[in-house]
Image: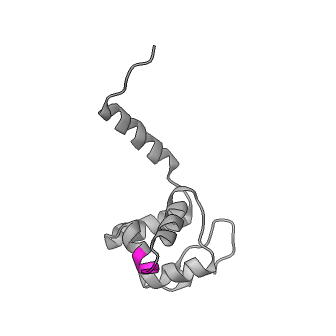
């Protein structure tokens, strides 16, 4: 029989899903650490990367954090500029040569 889930139970299921879907790549770990260290969220970083259209970098950042994607050259440079680091300081994908 199917029981109705209360709000608390739904949140627990949602949180468990989010914990399982966080990307476990070197780059995602580094990005999460940088955001935490700076007290910055994804939306704030996205606005720094592209103030005119922050939705585009926000989507890319979420792909990096939750889907294991890695930034290409243009996004790596935008990310470096927004964080005040050089592109070389940004970890390369686990399967690519360092930049």
Percent across and percent down for residue 39 are 31, 70
Please tell me whether residue 64 is drawn above or below residue 80 in the rendered image. Answer: above
Please give the name of the residue rendered at 35% of the width and 39% of the height, measured from the top-left corner: 11
Left or right placement of residue 32 versus residue 27 in this view:
left
Q: Position of residue 89 (x, y in %)?
A: 52, 80
Say above or below: 78 vs 55.
below
Q: Residue 82 in magenta?
A: no
| Quadrant of image for the C terminus | bottom right
- Name the spot of residue 47 as percent of width and height, x first: 40, 76
Q: Residue at x 37, y 34 (%)?
A: 10
Quadrant of res 12: top left
Residue at the front extreme, as displayed: 52
Q: Quadrant of residue 48?
A: bottom left
Residue 97 pos. (x, y %): 69, 75
Q: Nearer the viewer, residue 83 or 49?
A: 49
Q: Judge whether residue 48 is colored magenta.
A: yes
Is 52 situated above or below 36?
A: below
- Which quadrant is the N terminus positioned in? top left
What's the magenta region?
47-52
Q: In the image, what residue occupies the spot 69% across and 71% down?
A: 96
**In the rendered view, would you say 86 is above or below 64?**
below
Q: Is residue 4 left or right of residue 29?
A: left
């Amino acid at each position: 029989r199917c029981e109705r889930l209360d709000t608390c139970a739904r949140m627990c299921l949602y949180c468990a899903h989010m914990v399982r879907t966080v990307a476990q790549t070197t780059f995602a770990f580094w990005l999460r650490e940088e955001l935490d260290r700076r007290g910055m969220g994804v939306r704030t970083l996205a606005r720094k990367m592209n103030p005119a259209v922050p939705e585009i970098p926000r989507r890319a950042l979420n792909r990096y954090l939750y889907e294991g994607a890695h930034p290409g050259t243009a996004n790596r440079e935008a990310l470096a500029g927004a964080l005040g680091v050089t592109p070389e300081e940004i970890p390369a994908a686990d399967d690519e040569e360092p930049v």
